[in-house]
Image (cartoon, helix red, strand yellow):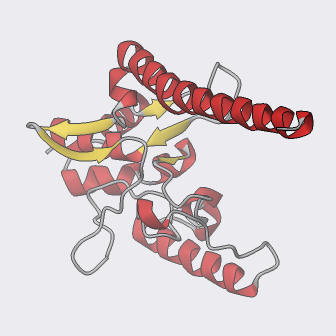
Amino acid sequence: MSAPLLFSGRQVGAAVRALLIATVVLGLVYPLLITGVAQLIAPGRADGSLVEVDGQVLASSLIGQAFTDADGDPLPQYFQPRPSASGYDGAASGGSNRGPNSPELADLIAQRRAEVAAFNGVDPADVPPDAVTASASGLDPGISPAYAALQFDRVAGERGVAPDEVAALAAQATVGRDLGFIGAPYVNVVQLNLALDRELP
């Protein structure tokens, strides 16, 4: 065998061994290690932040849900989430891909603003942006504190309690900024609605 062919064969062999080692280390050992560490540090989050009631998994606190009746109408006794272009379907996660100059988006926002205002008995000018625009994923579980506050009176009236009681539960379901300065505070709608059923049935 000539020297160049022998050298080439050694290179191929070394490349195959490096590929196998990288596959085992990065494709098996590393994921298992990180999974194990996650299970030790934050098992609930590692398992998907699942929410259980009476031993039954109802939701994930990381994924938004629609709180509607069989006809798709919003249930007035619950806080309503942001709109979703994907219908809160994790398999179809995504936005509408309509840009800021889209007339269809402008019409949809105007329609949503009118519906949210009528549903909550407020002036359309008081409806915050996140009440009428979907998130990029369509799965956002949070709403702004302003949108939550807009819904206090409606939810309290439907449940026959004072708005302050509803506001207190919303405060408990409010998530602050990451590390104290990244992002904006938001109210987790899934956790809040579960708290409503638990505390104010």
Q: State the image coordinates of residue 20 (x, y, percent, origin top left).
A: 58, 32
Furthest residue in direction right, as rendered: 4
For residue 130, side relative to residue 157 (left or right): right
Q: Is residue 184 above or below residue 151?
A: above
- The quadrant of the picture occupied by the N terminus is top right
Residue located at (48% from left, 76% from top): 115
Decide if residue 163 is in sight here.
Answer: no
For residue 157, which quarter of the picture? Answer: bottom left
Q: Is residue 31 depicted above or below 69 in this figure? A: above
Count of numbered labels shown in the rendering: 0
Q: Position of residue 94 (x, y in %)?
A: 57, 65
- Up the image or down, 108 lies above or below 21; here it is below
Q: Residue at x 40, y 58 (%)?
A: 80
The picture places residue 81, in percent across and down from the top left corner, at 44, 57
Question: What residue is at 33 percent from the left and 69 percent from the top?
Answer: 74
Q: Residue furthest front?
A: 1
Which quadrant holds the C terminus? top left
| Pick the front one: 3 or 196 | 3
User: Residue at left 54%, top 75%?
Assistant: 112
- Residue 35 is left or right of residue 96, and the answer is left
Q: Position of residue 139 (x, y in %)?
A: 48, 56
- In this orientation, does residue 183 appear? yes
- Residue found at the far left of this picture: 54
- Comparing 25 with 3, the one in front is 3
Where, by quadrant of the figure, is residue 77 drawn?
Answer: bottom left
